[in-house]
Amino acid sequence: MMEKSIAKEVLNPPGWKKPRGYANLVKTTGGTTLFAAGQGAFDAQGHLVGEGDICLQYDQIFKNVQEVLALGGAQMTDIVRMTIYCTDRDAFFARGKECGQIFKKYFGDYCPASTFVEINKLFVDGMLLEIEATAVIG
């Protein structure tokens, strides 16, 4: 029995540097699930924001996740699954109160299912965090 193919639309925010090797957002139809690629702390021109500052990068990443999800008609509280990759969890936890305030700014009291992973390196030097998210909209 052959399964029915799901329609997918690949989206990238207008004015952003075109990504290489990934899409910022893949939108599926039929009870729509949005899969946002891992986002780093880059501005619209592709420059790293907040080098050496984990909180500045955390905030920029959530701005990027929010902008990417908006392309598919979703908001931050539509995120059902999120993975956070971090190169230094101790640095993150040392500024936990500030990072918690940043999280609350984007999610309020809502918390999606999340995984926090400490890794050795990210793809671009200077990146301290990367966040990927899956959202569902009705």
Image (cartoon, rainbow, N blue to C red):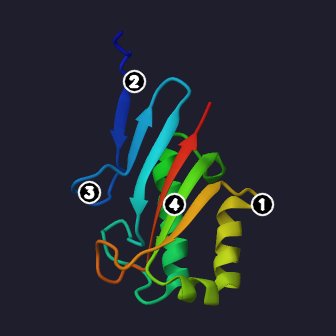
Residue at which label 1 appears? 109
- Inspect the image, locate mark 4, and give the three-letter code of the amino acid beneath it: Thr
Mark 4 vs mark 2, CA separation in Å: 24 Å
Residue 87 sits above or below residue 34 on the image: below
> Which of these two is toward me, 118 or 130?
118
Of label 3 and label 4, which has the lower sequence position?
3
Of label 1 and label 2, which has the lower sequence position?
2
Of label 4 and label 2, which has the lower sequence position?
2
State left or right for residue 36 relative to residue 109.
left
Mark 3 vs mark 1, CA separation in Å: 32 Å
Residue at which label 3 appears? 19
Residue 11 is situated, as x and y percent measured from the top left of the image, at: 36, 43
> Which of these two is toward me, 73 or 15?
73
Q: Secondary structure at mark 4?
A: strand
Mark 3 vs mark 4, CA separation in Å: 20 Å
Residue 54 sits above or below residue 117 on the image: below
Q: Are marks 3 and 2 in contact (CB under 8 Å)?
A: no
Residue 91 sits above or below residue 31 on the image: below
- Inspect the image, locate mark 3, and give the three-letter code of the amino acid beneath it: Pro
Mark 1 vs mark 2, CA separation in Å: 33 Å
State left or right for residue 23 relative to residue 77.
left
- Inspect the image, locate mark 2, and give the three-letter code of the amino acid beneath it: Ile
Residue at which label 4 appears? 83
Image quadrant assignment for residue 97? bottom right
Q: Which quarter of the rendered picture does the N terminus lie within? A: top left
The residue shown at (34%, 78%) is: 121
Residue 124 is situated, as x and y percent measured from the top left of the image, at: 29, 75
Residue 44 sits above or below residue 8 on the image: below
Residue at which label 2 appears? 6
Residue that sits furthest to the left in the current view: 20
